[in-house]
Image (cartoon, rainbow, N blue to C red):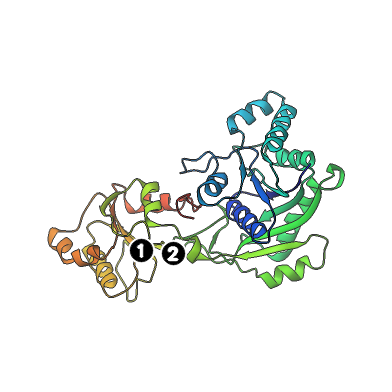
Amino acid sequence: MVRSVILVPVSEKVGLTTVSLGLVNALEQTGVKVTFFKPVAEKTEGSDYADLSTAILNETCNIPTIPPLDQNHAEKLIASGNGDDLLEEVIARLEAHKNDAQLIVVEGMVPNRDIAFANRFNLEIARTLGSKVVFVGTPGNHGAAEILERMEIAENYFGGKNGCTVSGCIINKIAADYDDAKNTPDIVSGIAPPTTVTREQLEERFGNGEMKLLGAIPWNRAISAPRVSDLTQYLGAHCINVGESQSRRIRNIKMYAAALSQNEFTAGTFIVTPGDRNDVFVAAALASMNGVDIAGILLNDNRLPEPAIMELCEEAMARGLPVLSTPADTWSTASALQNFNLSLAVDDF
């Protein structure tokens, strides 16, 4: 059977898609004939595609992919005690589509409350395909010792009596502004502190044990920033001025319900404010006209600034400043923003 490596997420929201795509690209750049395989599709919230990683590769490059099995079909087989049949279907699909691949990169399933069988399935796939296992995790708010312990717990489950070969781990999203409760980087300003663990601390801690640190990937807010159009779609907001929604990036979100202070606006700031806050709207528009790359403005409560104010800010909108409106109040919007999925969009790769 062709050689394979399986990327196994140790928790939700570890950036599995970006790590998978990065590994596939790196292997291709070295001349390896690589094929990507997600055995069972996982629907990403807010995406129209059955599986995000497979869709991105199919839409953006010539790297071969193997079509995944339907998640509902997989769940029914496992629920009925026919897990072996599912494994046979996975193997059959791989054999039918592997072509001349030298290496198959397998993306494991993400363990969460909706997919209770994910860890067991990843283990069985690794054993059945004889894949080398690479764990993918994030620091969260943990120190290097705790991160190593989590990886060793995963290794004990896959290795040992279960017989898988564990190659090591990749730690993603180092130094992200982090919300540990959701295990996800935070783009709403002032909510969560940045992680403190460093690559050097990880290398020192992992260097003393058997678990190999294969990669330590820093969080880059600039390249991970969603577009205004992505947030518009998520919130179902109305576009008062579309502007450059497809290209402007949201690096941080600021909520305005109180008075403004000096130097409030920085490049990439997305402003959320009640629609009757003329002072915020004018200040943001003026900052945009003065060269500050404001990401956009969201007006709450289905309210709009007075016509004279809108006219005053026409130049900013003509230069591409996106302006959106939503019927929700500021606090409801803030709650929704905390659940905004930062996954890659297929058309933004």
Residue 193 x %, y %: 53, 66
Name the residue furthest front. 100
Q: Is residue 218 left or right of residue 59?
A: right
Quarter occupied by the N terminus: top right
Name the residue furthest left. 308
Q: Which amino acid type is shown beneath numbered disc 1?
A: Ala
Q: Is residue 22 left or right of residue 337?
A: right
Which residue lies at the image location 39% right of the left edge and 54% below the top edge? 334
Are the residues flagged by discs 2 and 1 in contact, CB closer than 8 Å?
yes
- The residue labelled by disc 1 is 295
Which residue lies at the image location 66% right of the left edge and 47% below the top edge? 35
* CA separation in Å, label 2 and label 1: 8 Å
- The residue labelled by disc 2 is 251
| Front residue (pair 200, 30) | 30
Residue 263 versus residue 63 in the image, above or below: below
Upstream in the sequence, badge 2 or badge 1?
A: 2
Which residue lies at the image location 63% right of the left edge and 42% below the top edge? 38
Q: Which amino acid type is shown beneath numbered disc 2?
A: Arg
Which of the numbered marks, if any, corresponds to residue 206?
none
Instruction: Look at the image and tell me whether residue 9 can be seen.
Output: no
Q: For mark 2, give the secondary structure.
A: loop
